[in-house]
Amino acid sequence: MGEINKNAQQLKAVLVSNKRVGQYHQLIVNIGDVASLCKPGNFVAINVGGDTSRMVLRRAFAISRVSTNSISGGTMELIVAPHGQGSTWLCSQGEGSVLDVVVPLGTAFGIPTEPVHVLLVGGGYGSAPLFGLAEVLNARGCRVDMLLGASTASKIYAPMEGKRAVNSLRIYTEDATMGQAGRVTDPIKALVDDMNIAVIYSCGPMAMLSAIDSITRGTEVVHQCAVEESMACGIGICMTCVLPTKDSDGNIAMLRSCIDGPVMDGENVMWDSVGKSL
Amino acid sequence: MSSLDFSTTLANAWFPAPIFTASGCASSGSELAQFFDLHSIGGVVTKSVMTKARHGRPTPRMAETPSGMLNSIGLQGPGIDAFIAKDIPYLVEQKARIIVSIAGETVEEYATLARKLRGVSGISAIEVNISCPNVENRGLVFACDPDASRRVIDGVRRTIGGELPIIAKLSPDVTDLVHIARSVVDAGADAVALINTVLGMVINLDTMRPHLGGKTGGLSGPAIRPIAVRAIYQVHAALPNVPILGMGGVASGRDALEMIAAGASGVSIGTASFGNPSAIPTIQNELKELLIAKGFTSLRDAIGFAHRTEIADVD
């Protein structure tokens, strides 16, 4: 047993349910007892295309929620948008299909020990893992406010049942088709200034994460962000999903977003250097 | 139940099984240890290490292609001192057999790396990676030039003495591979590793620019397997006494046996591990069963089998 990937299991897992929700699919996968090892922020790597596929790489998906006591045993929920060949294949799988999954992978969101005030910020379908996180934070006694944003209404993921775990939810769309017009990052500065927010949890496009960092950098507010970078393996061996980082001692490194992420301290990411040579 | 001698050798290094990780596709082993026992496979070929820590190329570093992928890592790594201090002791503790892969920008850098490794115990062999395609200057790909290849291997051989087997990792992107293989063997290489990735490119049609941060990348995966089998076959035909560590798109026991029949004494698994963390033990088991099913009693009898002029029945 290694320290890296230490809870990860490779399983043949049954797809219990596949429902279309707007532009996304909600997939429920039976992963048995492994569900109890999954924490908000962790992801799963899934084989796509079947044995004869020309797609040789796994696809990584954030786990939006787990249930350890459903009728079919432990399950995980994934919210998947069918936009590439791999995700389209996955969304086309019927209930009862067997998937080859490696789970859980990556770092998890840190949960405060005290019942503090937290802000959850999600962009597009990146918001999915925030609902599972909200339930954990709510159980910890935290005040949980949530901001969701997307370019247009159909790209907002906000399930009814997910709203129960949050104290408030505001939605922003750039084309004003849902909620308020504007970007999800627009109100953050005022919220941080006016309220005693201890932690911002974010999940979504890199530009959104970077914009939040520019607000929290140098303040007392901790920014825990789930980063997105394309990966080949998900387990730390391919070195493709790296991000430039600088720790509090000034050490600069290209860290793998699969094993040193996806949840990273936003202050450690060198946002201006992403995609550039160090 | 048939018994099979599954062991193999690469020069004077002995391995209980012929399946290895491929350099650059297993980091330094610890990431895969959650999925299988590193001691249970032939050996771990570590990611090519240089003298100094290196950040590598900018992202994007990866593009999936039909039955393969391009990578453009640029030899990111901790540098030889940290590697010797941390990674080797871990692998020794796991009882893994270790082949250390080294890469340099100059002939002198390779010799320096060999000097650092000379006194380190627990190493079975050194892979000298003279063929990484992800360097700034294609002129730095030593394996594209017989004379440069010879100078690197000669420097490593002189530094390391006669103790550790040297495996020269060669590029398929050359006109006369056998000529390069002869050069490195003449300079003191005990074995050759065939093949490194094939230089490729993907254009991103959203940006209308090369997709990878490093523009070009190394193509790996099943797409390149026939190139690897051809390379192994050609070199084994010309240099039948030089052991070959084969790699390039192996994803099953059948694929591994193709390489062995072409002339490989061992087979490394790279991209298949990205798609399946347990690919290596699975392929190793499939190969074992396949050899038994074909009536072989020793892996070594299958090495280079495709070169036999008469197709003999095996018992």
Image (tube, coloured by chain):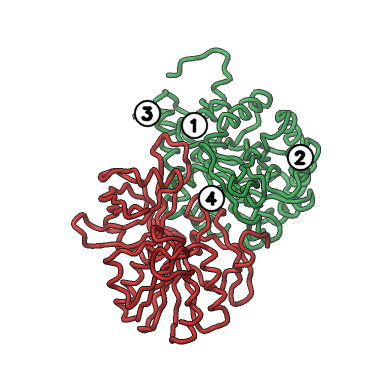
The image quadrant of residue A203 is bottom left
Question: Which kind of residue does numbered mark 2 sit on?
Answer: Ser
Number of other residues with Cα within 10 Å of mark 1, as a class: few under 14, some 14 to 19, many 20 or more: many
Residue B2's mark?
3
Q: Dot 1 falls on which chain?
A: B
Helix, strand or loop status at disc 3? loop
Dot 3 or dot 2: first in sequence order is: 3
Give the Cα distance between marks 4 and 1.
19 Å
**In the rendered image, which residue does mark 1 sit on?**
B255
Do the residues marked 4 and 2 share a common chain? yes
Number of other residues with Cα within 10 Å of mark 3, as a class: few under 14, some 14 to 19, many 20 or more: few
**In the rendered image, which residue does mark 4 sit on?**
B26
Toward the left, the furthest residue is: A71
From the viewer's perspective, is B144 left or right of A103? right
Question: Which kind of residue does numbered mark 1 sit on?
Answer: Asp
Dot 4 or dot 1: first in sequence order is: 4
Do the residues marked 2 and 1 share a common chain? yes
Q: Residue B295 at what x, y percent from top left?
A: 42, 23
Give the Cα distance between marks 2 and 1.
29 Å
Which lettered chain is shown in red? A
